Image (cartoon, rainbow, N blue to C red):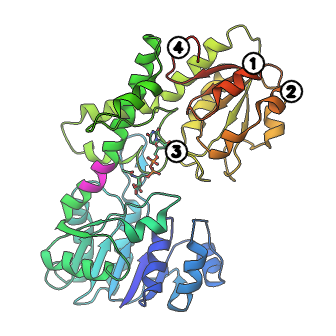
Amino acid sequence: MKISVLGLGYIGLPTALLFAASGHEVIGVDVNEEKVKMLNSGQLPFQEPGLKELFEKARSNFRASTKVEESDVFLIAVPTPLDEHTKAADLKYVKSAAEMIWPHLQKGNLVILESTVPPRTTERILVPILEKSGLRAGTDFYVAHCPERAIPGRTLYEMVHNDRIIGGITRKSAELAKKLYSSFVKGNIYLTDATTAEFVKLIENTYRDVNIALVNELAKIAEEYEINIWEAIELANRHPRVNLHKPGPGVGGHCIAIDPWFVIQDSSNGKMIALARHINDTMPNYVLRKIQEMLKDVKYPTITVLGVAYKGNVDDARETPALRFIKLAENAGFKVKVHDPFVKEFDYPLLSLEEAVKDSDCLVVITDHDVFKFLDPESIGKLMRRRYVFDARNILDHERWHKAGFIVKVLGNGKENL
Ligand code: SAJ
C-alpha cells in the first residue's frame, strides 16, 4: 500500500515508521519544512524509546514531504488542541488536513483519522470535506477513526501491543482499516462505528481524570482527619474491586487534561466531568497553600521546584501543573528556582540541581522522576538556607530526609509524625 501520513508528531511519526517498517510505502506529510528536511536527512525531531532503531529499519520505505500526493491510504494524525476560552476542540488542523487530501482522493481509497476528536467529528466534519472530491464516502471511498492509545515513554511498545478500537463509517471501512493495522498491531482489534470509537477514546482518558480528581479530593479530606491518604489508598486497594489512583499536584499532558472537555462540549450533561477537571486544575493552588502554611515564619522565601515534566521520567512539559504552580508561587511573593533533569525547553530558566537548591528554603517535588528518589538530603541540605521539603508525589524516603534535619510534608498526609 502507498500510505500518506499527515502530521509527523508524537503519534504520526511512530505510526508512519511502523507502517514503513512493515513493508508499506509511506510518505510522511508535515507543514513544518524544517521537520521534513530533518527527517529526509536522517534526523529525528524528538526522542522516544526505540524510535531511532525503528527509523533505521523503516528509512528505505519512508520519505517526508510538505505536500500530499495520490495514495491508497491517507492517515490523519494532527493535533486537536483545546480552545481555552470555549473549552471545545479546535479542529482547524483536522480540517486543513482534510482539505489537503480531497483533491487527491480516488475511488477505493481509505482515509483514517487517528487524532483525538469530539464525538461525530468523523461523520460531520471530516466526511463532508472529503466529499468535495465528488466521491461518496462509504461507497466510493472509505473512512475510519482509529484512535491511538499509546502512552508517552512507551509509545512504540504500546502502539504494537495494545488492543485497538477501529470505528468505520461503514463496516467495510472498519474492516479495511483493520486489515491495514494488522500489518504491525499485535493486540486485538475491535470494530465499531466511528462515533463510538471517538467516544471510547475520550472516555478512557476521562475515566483516568475523574479517578485522579477523586483521590486528589480524598487527599485533602485525609489531611483534615489527620490521617495519611497514601496508607489509606494502599489498604483500600487490597479490596478486589478497588483501584484508587495516586494524588498529585495536578494533571498534565496533552490528553487527560483535555479529552474530558471534548466529551462534554456538545452535551447538556457532564457536571461531574467538569468538576473533576476543576479539582485537578486547582491542585497547584492547594499545594501552594500547604507550602505557605509550612513556611509561614520564613521571610521572603525561596523555593526550589524539582521537576516540571507533566509526569515522571519523560522530557515532556506540555500542560504541566508545574507551570501553574510556579506562576502562583511567584504571585504569592516566593522566589522560585527550577530544576528538571530531562526537560529541555520551558517557560522558566532550568537550573542545575546545585544552582537550584543553593540558598533555597524549601524543596517542592512536583514531578515523580525516579532520579529524585536518590537525592542525598545531607549534601543538598548543606547548600540550602533552610531545610524544608514538600513532597507532592510521595516519592522521597521521608525518614532519611527527616534524619538530615528537614521538616518534611507530604501531600495528603495529615499525620503529625510522618
Ligand atoms: N497522574 C496522577 N495520578 C495518577 C496517574 C496519573 O496524578 O494516578 C497524572 C500524571 O502525573 C500526569 C497525568 O496524570 O500529569 C497524566 O499522565 P498519565 O500517565 O496518566 O497519562 P498520559 O497523559 O501520559 O497518557 C494518557 C494515557 N491514557 C490512559 O492511560 C487512559 C494513554 O494511554 C493515552 O494514549 C494518552 O493519554 C493519549 O494520547 O490520549
Q: Which of the numbered marks, if any, corresponds to residue 415? A: 4
> Is 250 contained in the magenta span?
no
For marks 1 and 2 on the same chain, the one whose residue lies earlier in the sequence: 1
From the viewer's perspective, tell me whether residue 116 is left or right of residue 153.
Answer: left
**Alpha carbon distance from label 3 to label 4:** 32 Å
The reply to whether callout 1 and callout 4 are in contact (CB within 8 Å) is: no
Which residue position holds label 1? 301
| Above or below 394: residue 97 | below
Closer to the camera in the image, 34 or 21: 21
For marks 1 and 4 on the same chain, the one whose residue lies earlier in the sequence: 1
Which residue position holds label 2? 382
Q: How many numbered discs?
A: 4
| Amino acid at circle 2 | Lys
Q: Indicate which label's residue lies in the foreground, 4 or 2.
A: 4
Closer to the camera in the image, 201 or 33: 201
Magenta segment range?
A: 200-204
Q: Which of the numbered marks, if any, corresponds to residue 21? A: none
For marks 4 and 2 on the same chain, the one whose residue lies earlier in the sequence: 2
The structure residue drawn at horizontal position 60% and vertical position 46%, both measured from the top left corner, is 309
User: x%, y% of residue 116?
Assistant: 35, 58
Badge 4: residue crowd in 10 Å (few <14, some 14–19, many ≥20)? some
The structure residue drawn at horizontal position 25% and vertical position 55%, both measured from the top left corner, is 200
**Alpha carbon distance from label 3 to label 2:** 33 Å
The reply to whether callout 1 and callout 2 are in contact (CB within 8 Å) is: no
From the viewer's perspective, tell me whether residue 61 is left or right of residue 273.
Answer: right
The structure residue drawn at horizontal position 84% and vertical position 32%, both measured from the top left corner, is 379
